[in-house]
Image (tube, helix red, strand yellow):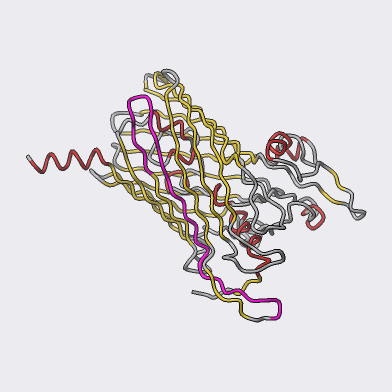
Amino acid sequence: MKRRILKISSICAFATSLLIGSVSAQSSSQLSIAQIAGQLNVITPAVPLLLISPDSRASALGDAGVASTADINSLHWNAAKMATLDKEMGFSVSYTPWLRELVDDIYLAYLSGYKKLDKNSAVGISLRYFSLGKIDFTGYNGESLGSANPNEFVVEAGYARKLGRRLSGGFTGKFIYSNLTQGQGVSGGSSAGITGATDVSVYWLNEDLKISKRDVAYGVGLNISNIGGKISYTESGQRGFLPINFRIGNSLKAELDEYNTIEFLLDFNKLLVPTPPTYTSDSTFEGYSNDVGVAQGIVQSWYDAPGGFKEELNEWTISTGIEYWYDKQFAVRAGYFYENEFKGNRKYLTLGAGLQYSVFNIDFSYLVPAYLNRNAIGGNHPLKNTLRFTLIFNFEQAKSASKDTAK
């Protein structure tokens, strides 16, 4: 591994930049990106791990998943979808190498599972673990402060229930642990950030439609995720907002014939986190102060952009994807993610495939930054040229296989 020597004061900025890709992290209270780069004004919440797509199916669909057909990883995208799963239970494990072109020990691991309680309800659990690898800490004079392995993890538990023939609702609770400093000293001391959060979601699915005599299913999903308290890594430091996120989207799945199905997805996302104000040379600012509580921050996030309505529109990201299945055995996926150039400028294509066996399913995904110039802002995505995979275990198929073997 390539050894990295980082000052302790840069650890939090480093972790945040992993999600943004190539936009430098800013202070949530004083530093204005608009002052530095003219028009950039990126929202950089704490614990960006909560926004990273953890599974290969959705990551191959441009990170669209709030209204896709339900699967084992629905807990992350929209817990309400779990109520529509037709199998009794399932389990999956996902692995994502991070910054693979630079280092070999940063990765995201994700474990997820669900259990149907009855035909109308289900529960799900998951564990998300992000390792930042080994880091050598040094002081301002170059003296060694030792080594550490910063990491973060999130434990989730969710419940979903059908509220009607086509409507279902879901609720998720989360425990968040973010240990970026490993106790290394900064002014006032440092410690792990610990907090909790919740998701609230709904899912509407109509499977009784027909287009040109073909069976069609249309779904709409909405998920407000990561609603929780602020987090801090020092006793004297300012507490940062979690990436509270509003996601809404729809899906259209059509059965072309007995063997072929295709599904189209479109998601829209907006962070419910205050937009940083822009500061002038005399320390006055345009916009609204982002030193507010969580509830006020959620409400304020809809109208507080210094650039007005146009800037608010720029804060939405778009995810779109397409999934094709042949004989329910082989899938091909593609997608596209768009973020405005002044709000992070992440733009990338995604590709993927899936194979379904009697007991195991396996999904792959691959990300391609949509830039000709790799040095452009947003051009060096941390997942560039990285293959991600998810392994799914189907308990019902395993039981059937066991019975067949016994016979």
Please, is residue 124 above or below residue 381 in the view?
A: above
Depth order, front residue of 162/330: 162
Q: Quadrant of residue 189?
A: bottom right
Residue at 52% x, 56% y is 152
Magenta stretch, residue numbers: 113-141
Q: Quadrant of residue 287?
A: top right
| Residue 105 drawn in magenta | no
Left or right, 9 with respect to 84, comes to right
Please, is residue 303 above or below residue 12 in the view?
A: above
Left or right, 400 with respect to 74, comes to left
Image quadrant holding the C terminus, namely top left
| Residue 135 drawn in magenta | yes
Tell me residue 76's x, y (percent). Answer: 48, 41
Tell me residue 249's x, y (percent). Answer: 54, 32
**Magenta stretch mostly in which secondary structure?**
strand
Depth order, front residue of 186/210: 186
Tell me residue 248's x, y (percent). Answer: 56, 32
Please, is residue 342 above or below residue 139 in the view?
A: above
Which residue extends farthest right?
282
Residue at 62% x, 46% y is 242
Tell me residue 227's x, y (percent). Answer: 60, 39
